[in-house]
Amino acid sequence: MYDAIVVGARCAGAPTAMLLARAGHRVLLLDKAAFGTDVLSTHLVHQPGVAALARWGLLDAVRATGCPPLTHVRYEVTGTDVRLEGSARGVEGQRAGYAPRRNVLDPVLAQAAVAAGAEYRDRCTVTGLLYDDSGRVVGVEGRHGGRTFTERAHLVIGADGMRSTVARLAGAPYTVEDPRLTCAYYTYWTDVPATMELYERAGAWVAAVATNDGATLVLAYFPQYRFDAVRADAFTAYLGQIRATAPELYERLRGRQPAERLRGTGDQQNFFRQATGPGWVLIGDSGHHKDSITARGISDGFRQVESLVEYTGGLLGGDPERLDEALSKFAEDRDATLLPGYEATLAVARLEPHEQRLSLLRAVQTDPELTSIYFDMVAGIGSAEALYTPKLLSLL
């Protein structure tokens, strides 16, 4: 009997297993993929996520992979006079973001879970949930190494992504659901210097961030309605979007070939699912997913991990009713904490820069302090209200 079974060993599941194991719980961590494999994902960790890595004692391990700090941000609205450059003020002394490759970051997290005492199985498929006579989830069944298995636990934690098997098996309904707004394509380029660059125009968004091995991740976003046309000749569309939206960046790419194949998706779902039920809970993308355009997924996942462990601390293996009450409080906290960022992400993903926001940005860019507060907001550190200082109101 495990205290917890965590399904999914990536950015939400692995640190959950790690923190629970550090707290003395017996944890089983399962993942359907092989250890160290890559995944279709952006991989920017904003400063709140970096602060979490530091609290967990893992930031040095991420830095040791050679992933460079992103201390300088450049943000432009193409075709206008809006251009912001500067740095976020940061949180808990962490002013830099990092963009480690997922085949680098995920193993760091999984190894930390194992070092804490969690039992880890990769290439493991969960096929069902186990229930007691009251309808409470009490474990999982699945396949591993060509054999079926059943394992029991006081809590089953679904951290298995946007298409979560645990969510499907538990029948977790959507509580908030919005249409897909963008499709996105990305690849990696070498010898293309960049730190963190963001470019926007009507119907387009382009980003570039430095990552491992001297590579630069370059992403291009398109409106969702263009997905069929874009994927018909994705690389041509990708370069065309960069050329129109970030011409100076395009010149740095001209004449070069990407280091890897182009990857992309038109399935950028926007939702909240019911977070919990008797004996189960969803964290990370399983319970809440939004367009990757603001790159909030990893940092928001880390936030959920710490919240879940805080609410359930000392309750695994005890009174099930008390555990369910704690899980309900976690769910309420999740929704209240993440809804503002969700709404802000949808606003960006509509790819419609409005004149009112452009006027705001023109005021912000005149002052380094306001620029830093704005980049805090981009990183999810502060709210939009924090930007409206007396200085900004005076400028407006």
Image (tube, rainbow, N blue to C red):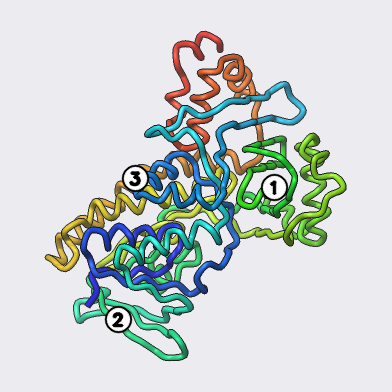
Residue designated by label 2: 151
Local packing at callout 3 (Cα closer than 10 Å; few below 14, some 14-19, many 20+) is: few
Point out the residue furthest to the left here.
319
Given residues 273 and 63, the one toward you in this image is 63
Q: Nearer the viewer, mark 3 or mark 2?
A: 3
For the N terminus, which image quadrant? bottom left
Q: Is residue 196 above or below residue 232?
A: above
Question: Tag 2: residue type?
Answer: Glu
Given residues 127 and 373, the one toward you in this image is 373
Image coords of residue 116 (percent x, y): 31, 62
Q: Is residue 247 above or below residue 137?
A: above
Q: Is residue 74 above or below residue 224?
A: above
Question: Tag 3: residue type?
Answer: Arg
Residue designated by label 3: 55
Q: CA distance from mark 3 to mark 2?
A: 31 Å
Which of the 4 quarters of the picture holds residue 316? bottom left
Q: CA distance from mark 1 to mark 3?
A: 30 Å
Image coords of residue 90 (percent x, y): 45, 31
Image coords of residue 71 (percent x, y): 55, 33
- Report helix, strand or loop for mark 2: strand
Q: CA distance from mark 1 to mark 2?
A: 42 Å
